[in-house]
Structure formats: C-alpha cells, structure tokens
Image: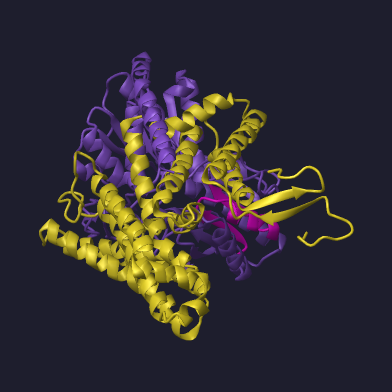
Chain colours: A yellow, B purple
Amino acid sequence: MTNEKHVKEPLFHITRRTDIKPLAAWGIRLIAVVAALIVSALVIVTITNYNPIEVYAKMIEGSFGSERKFFILLQNTAMLLCVSLAVTPAFKMKFWNLGAEGQVLVGGLASAACMFYAKDSLPSWLLIIIMLVTSILSGIIWGVLPAVFKAIWRTNESLFTLMMNYVAMQLVSFFIMVWVPNGSSVMGVLNQKSESGWLPVVFGQKYGLNIIIVALLTVVMFIYLHFSKQGYEISVVGESENTARYVGINVKKVIIRTMVISGAICGLAGFLLVSGTNHTISKELAGGMGFTAIMVSWLAKFEPVMMIFTSMFIVFLQKGAGEIATAFRLNESVSDILTGIIIFFIIGSEFFINYKINMRSKSKGAE
Amino acid sequence: MKKLFALLLAVVMLMGLAACGSKNTEEKKTEEGIKVGLICLHDENSTYDNNFIQALKEVQEELGLKDDQVLIKTNVDESDACYNAAAELVDAGCDIIFADSFGHESFMIQAAKEFPEVQFCHATGTKSQTEGLDNFHNAFAAIYQGRYLAGVAAGMKLNEMIEKGTITADKAVIGYVGAFDYAEVVSGMTSFFLGARSICPTATMKVTYTNSWFDIAKEKESALNLINSGCVLISQHADSEGAPKACEEKGVPNVAYNISTISMGPNTALISSKIDWSVYFKLAIEAVMNGKEIPTDYCGTMAEGAVKLTELNEKAAAAGTQEKLDEVQAKLESGELKVFDTKTFTVGGKELTTYTADVVDEGDFVPETEAIENGEFAESVKRSAPYFDIKYIDGISAL
C-alpha cells in the first residue's frame, strides 16, 4: 500500500491526514464510542441476556450514583491524572518511562516509613512536610537513575525503568516484613488512632486536598509544557535529538532534568496515596496506575487539560465495571470485556483521525 | 475546543444531578427487609473468595432473600477501596456487611466507627477483642480440625503407596505450598501434618512459601519444585488452582483447601477441607433480623458444621478412607481426639509444656498469652483467628 501510482491501483490505500479539523476529529471519536456501545450491547445480550440500556445506566450509577461515588470518582481520577502528568514530560521527550509504578511505590514507601517510625512523636504538619519531601526525593532517585544511564551510557530506558518497578515492589515487601513480624504481610492502617501524618480533611472532603493539589499540578504542567523554555526544549528533544543538539540544547541535561520532574511527581503521587488516601502501604499501592497512565497520556496527546477527561473516562469505566458486577452478579470479567471493547474502539478511532482511507477510483474519502 | 469542554462538563453535571434525584427511591427499598453486603478481595476465580460467595448465596436462598438484598463487591483491595466499598454498601442500605480478607480489617474498623448503626463482620481478623466496638466483629472457624481430618486422608494414601511398593516408608514426604509464614498457615500445615502422621507414622513434610495469597503461576511452580525434590503428596494453603493442576500433570495426589478440586484433578485430587461460612453468615444475619447481638469473636467448629470436608474422590483415594474419616471425625466432634495434643508432637526433640502466643492484637507483635492448657495447644480458643505459629514441630522442615 503506497501512494505511488502503479498500473494496477489497489482497492484502497491509506494516506496521512494533516489537516483534520478538531470538530471532525471529535465526530470520529463520537462515532467510535457509539459503535463501541452497540458492539458491547450485542455482547451483553448474547452472554448475559440483560437489557443493555439497564447495564449502561448502572455503569453511570457507579460513578454518579451518589455524592460519595462522585467524590471517589474525582479522587481516583486525581490519582490517575497525577501519575499521567508525571509520565507526560518524559513521553513527550520520547523517553519511555515505564517505571511510574515503581516511582509511585517508592514514594509511598518513603511516606509510610516516616509514619511508621515517627508515629506521633512529631506534630502532624511537620511529619506531613517530612513525608512530602522524602517521597518526592525517593521518586526522583527512582526516576533519575535510568535517565543518567540513558544520558551517559545510552542504556535502554524502557527496560531499565520497567525493571526498577520490581526492585520497588521487593523493597516494599521487604519493609512490610520488617515492620510486621507476624508474617501476615499486611501493614494495616498507620497511626489509625492519632491520625498523625494523615492529610487533613478540607471542605468536609477526605480527598479534598488530593483533588486540589492535582488540579493545581495540572495547571502548572500545562504552563510548563506550553509556555516555558524547558517545555519547549522537551518538545525539540522529542522531535529530534540531532536538531536539539544543533540548536545548542544540552540533550543530556534535558533528559536528566525531565526525569527528575517525572520522578518527583510520581513521588508526590505516592505521598498522596499514603498520606491522603490509604494511610497504609502494600505492593498494590499503585495498582497498575503507572501503566494505565501511559494510555491516559497518549490518548490525550500529552495535553494536560485533555488528560483530565481521559483519566476520568478510564476511571469511569473501571467504576462502572465494578458496579455492573455487583448489580447484576456478573463476574467482573464481563465488565472487563466491555471496558476492553470501548477502549479498543477509542484507540482505533485515532487511526481514522490520523489517516485517511482512499478507495480505488471513484469513491473517495471513506472513513 | 472551549465549547466542547463546556458541553462535556454540562453532561457530567447533568448525570450527577440525575443520579442524585434517584437516590430517594433507593432508600425506600431498605424498609422492605434486611440488606446484606459482602466485600471480597478477589472474585469467583479465587477458591478462597468463591467459598465465601457460594456460602452467602446458600444463606440467601435459605432465608428467602432477593438478589438486591444481598450485594457482593468483588476485587476490593486491602486499601482505602475497602472502606469505600463498605461505605457504598451502607449507602445502598446494608444493615450488615462482611469482609473476607485479613487486610480489610483496619478499613472495616474505620467504617464501623463511622456507621455505628451498621454491623461489620470481618473474617479472619484479630482486632475485635481489643477495639471494643459494639458493631465490629471477627469470625473464623476451627479449620485445624478440618486440616487434621484431610491429613488423615493423606496418611491413608501414603500408607497405600507404601503397601503397593510405590515408595518406601522413609520416602513418605509430603510437600506443602504455603502462602506466607503466618500463624494461620503454620497452624493449618501443622494440623494437616499431625493428621497424616497419625495414620502414616513415617511421614515427614517439606514446606515452601509463595509470599502471595493468590498467584497461580507461583503456586504451580512451588508444587513442581516440591515434587521434583521428592515429595509424593502435595497439599497447599494458597487460593488458586495452581498446585492442584501441577499435581494432576505430574500424577501426584493432592489435598486441597476451600473447594473440591476433583474437576481440576480427576485422578489426583483426594479431598479438601473447608470452612463452611454459611453457618456464620446465617447466625449473624439472623441476629440482625431478630435484633440480637452478634458474637464479638466467633469460632465455628466441626461439630457445628462450620468446618467440613468436601466430597472424597474415590478414584484417587485409598480404599477404606471414608470409613476412617467418619471414625476420626466422630472423635474430633466429641472432643475425644485433640488435634494439638502435646503428646503427639515434639519441638526440638522435646514435648511442649509451655508456649506464649501473641493472642491480644495491640499491634505490638509481643506474645503474652499462655497457650498450652490441659495437655494441648488451645488453638482458636482465646481468639478465633489461629495463633499456633511454631515453626516447626519435628517432622516439618522448610524446603
């Protein structure tokens, strides 16, 4: 399939679109969602015999069914968004940071360690500041190690960051073993009685601070990527390292600096998960968010503001899946299938946004 | 673009409003009758969680409750997600909420403090006695009785292998796949071993841990490692089908836990011990229905039907196993036979006359309670969750 004209023209050929209007792009995405819902409806009817409309209604209820559910949606979105914001500058630079999971985990571990050792010997506000700093530092260490190796010795960052995840997981297991000598491997809630090191409740919302911090972070990241010199440097390095070098950008410095930022935000996410959400630590703290964040970031084309919607959408699907499982007594695998179909269509729609299929001779412009 | 954001936001808010509007109708439903919630760490694919889910469905049928009166939340992590799941169940009108995993406990306590009008029952936990909350309860069962009895079936099989000349008496080595070296696992493996050795006196046991409650690949790998190192019969305390399937592949007899594994290993699965949670579910739910108190820390026994063995696989088991099982079960139920009778085992070559166990869970991990009473280790008497954590009695060793 090429653009060259041969004697025999193929049935269709694919060309790259360069001039698609935002409205048309959103039209294609909307068609994809509708198509996904129709296919999912067919699946629901075939395997469960439930009314698909009822199933979709329950799905919406999972996120918007009550004030509590809505705030859980916001909280989960904030956490996923935070990790997505963390990986974005690195991905924009084409540095494949697959280690967000581990960076979040060590950040969380640092916070948990502070809570475990300090107990209530320090004022809570001071402990929170110490936790914040140590978490961010830990995240930075986990992020910057692969970056330094990449910048100096050209090691493969995907493998390096990925393997650091396992080191982080083992570290968490190790510390839980040390802190909980009975072998149950369950940390339990830290400082449950004194609530020392717990982020305070704001505006009557347990997750209030988490949501506010991530909202601010989104704005800062938007400004950083679009209106700062460093953000511009990231884009240039991402487009072409040679160009960057030619115009006098210190590529090594940019790689390391960007991964410091990426790691720091992951560390912050770890802090928010321990101090503001779970108040405990386990290997499942990040719960796969380090990887889901990559999808969130890509789907939003590395746009921090768009990521609010993509992360909320992913969380909405997850919450909906759980709600369906409970309401209809379906195994969660069924709802996972639905989530899979919807995401498949949405990612697939990006193809039709970026490329155009040209049919042979007369009929042109089919989508 | 801006218009689109505005549109999307509007849709989101509309959905929120519409949902809030329907809230009132949901609240009315609760007046019709009791509502029960169950929080599970995994779903039906885990034998452990499935055991809870099936038991609750049984009780639902028995008590004539409708599907919307029994809400089951699966795949709930041992994190803030557990608290949220409990709170959502309270919002949905649940009067009593169960949780099935050890790590759910702190979060159930958090919910119990916030919703004093709702009963929270946590299986396998240790804190109900120290927390002092009226609406927070623990439950477990004397599963060591079931493990012992399953061990008897294993001992019969070992004896058969020795008689047939498949192995010599000194090669009667059992392999045990444990999740963690935690008291619950240690207590289970020891009682299983004591049961097996009561029938096959030359039996010994090797133990290995997966460091996970549910990991199909690791459990399978661990079972294969044990088989390769000479174990001729495998049992496990981990929640997946990994070990039973490995045994079926290798043709090694297996004794399972939680559910019957005959369908996974038609030629090798002997029998399983299990806790029948329906006994506790029924007791607790009926207590709420009748306005009675739920025990703070409940331990079901074999005599009450809370501990059971699943169907014996006649094809794989040794001849005469069922008769032997019936005989031993009667003795266990009457109290004539004590599983942890200190005369039946030694630690470091000596009989155990005193042992301080960590029974009162104050988060300090300091043992404080004398557990040897009347010539036996009094397991699950002072607290429902097991506290026999002696690693190991003579005859058991780590792989």
Tell me what residue is drawn at x 29 percent, y 30 percent: B119
- Identify the residue shown where x is 32% and y is 26%: B95
- On the image, the x and y values in percent for residue A65 come to 38, 29
The boundaries of the magenta stretch are B231-257
Instruction: Examine the rendering and report whether any part of residue A95 can be seen.
Output: no
Query: Relative to the observer, which residue lies in front, B44 or B338?
Result: B44
In the image, taking residue A78 as reference, residue B211 lies left or right, namely right
Residue at (66%, 58%) from the top-left corner?
A: B252
Name the spot of residue A89 as percent of width and height, x first. 41, 65
Residue at the far right: name it: A7
Q: Which residue extends farthest bottom? A: A153
> Which corner quadrant of the image does residue A170 belong to?
bottom left
Please check the rendered image and state whether residue B170 is part of the magenta-colored stretch, yes or no. no
> Magenta stretch containing residue B249, yes or no?
yes
Above/below status of B90 relative to B150: above
Which image quarter: residue A184? bottom left
Residue A152 position in % (x across, y down): 45, 85
Q: In front here: B66 or A151?
A: A151
| Residue A100: percent from left, percent from top | 42, 63
